[in-house]
Image (tube, rainbow, N blue to C red):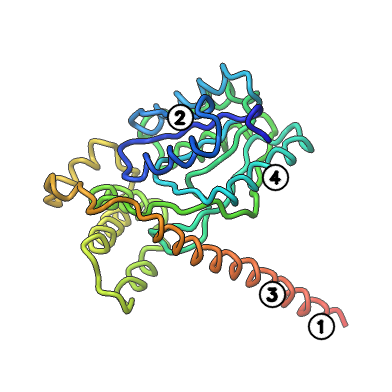
Amino acid sequence: MFESEIIFIVRESGENTKFFLLNQLKENFSNENVIVVREKPFEDALRSCFGLMANESLPFTVTIDADIILDIIGFTSFIQSAIHNFSLNPKLLMQQPYIYDHNFAEIRQAGVRIYRNSFASKLLNAVPSNGITARPETETISRVLDQFGLCETSVKTLVGLHDFFQTPLSIFKTSVLLGFKFKHKVKRSVKRISKSSKPISTSDLYFINGLLVGSKLKTAPTANELYAMIEDFGFSFEDNKFSGSVDEFEVNELLIIAYAKFKYRYIHLIFNRLDKYSIKLRNFF
C-alpha cells in the first residue's frame, strides 16, 4: 500500500471525536505512523507539525484535525490520488480533499491536507506570529507558494465528516471563528437553522450566537479574547460535556447524506459549465 510513504499527524485540542478518529487511523494504518500534536494556540501546533515533517524520512504527511471523522474508503482513495499527483509535479506542495461540514451543512474543504515533506522547513519558517490572522495555515501555505513558486491543488474526493458530535462549548468557539472568517455565510446559516423543520437545539443556539458574535469582529480573536467571550456568554462546566458517544450508525447515515450532497455538487457544477458553454456557442453563431 502507501504506508511506507506517509505519516499521519492528528492535531487535537480537546475535540470530542479525537479518540474515534485515532481508532480509525490505528485500525487501518500502522500505529507507528500516527502522531498526535497537542499545542495551543494553533500557530504553535503548526510549528510542531512542520518541525516533525522536516525531520521525517518519509516523503509525505497527512495532517488531520481531531474534529474529523473519516470515511476510510474515500480517505484511502484521496491518498492514492495525491501520491500520484505528487509524482507528476515536483513543485506540488499540498493537496486537499473535501469533507461534509456540520456547521454550514455543505461540502467544503477543511481539516485534512497532505504535504510533501521536503518543503516542511519552508513551511516552518513561514508560520505567522501568534494571533495576527484567523487562518494561520492558509496564510502559511500562501506565503510559501508565493515565495518559492510552488503550487497546490484539490482532489475531488470526499474523505469524511467535519465538526459533528462536538460539545456546545467547542461549537461556540468554532462558530465565533467561522463568523469572523466567513461573514458572507452568516445570514444564510441563521436562516437555514431558523427555517428547519427540526426543533432548534441548544447546540444550534450556541452556533448561531457564536456566528453573530464573530461576524461583528474587526480582527481575528486571540485565545484570551475567545475565553473572555465564553465567560461573558455564561458557559458552565456542564456546557462542555457531550451527552453520549460517537454513534457509528449515525456516522454511516451522515456519510450517506454527505455522498449525496457531494455527487449533487459536481453534477450541478458540470451542468452550470455546460450551460455557460452553450451560451457562448449561441453568441458565437
Q: Which residue is nearer to you in this view: 154 or 245?
A: 245
Q: CA distance from mark 4 to mark 2?
A: 24 Å
Q: CA distance from mark 1 to mark 4?
A: 37 Å
Looking at the image, which residue is at 32% across and 68% down?
A: 190
Q: Earlier in the sequence, mark 1 or mark 2?
A: 2
**Residue under numbered circle 2:** 46
Q: In this view, which residue lies farthest toward the right?
A: 285
Residue 282, label in figure: 1
Q: Position of residue 73 (x, y in %)?
A: 59, 50
Q: Earlier in the sequence, mark 4 or mark 2?
A: 2
Mark 2 falls on what kind of element?
helix
Q: CA distance from mark 3 to mark 2?
A: 39 Å
Please determine whether, in this image, residue 12 is positioned above or below residue 106: above
Residues tagged 4 and 3 counted as in contact (Cβ below 8 A): no
Split into 4 quadrants, where in the image is the C terminus? bottom right
Exactly how many numbered labels are in the figure?
4
Q: Position of residue 25 (x, y in %)?
A: 49, 38
Q: Name the amino acid, label 2.
A: Leu
Mark 4 falls on what kind of element?
helix
The answer to which quarter of the image holds residue 47 is: top left
Looking at the image, which residue is at 73% across and 41% down?
A: 85
Q: Residues within 10 Å of mark 1 (few under 14, many from 20)?
A: few
**Residue under numbered circle 4:** 81
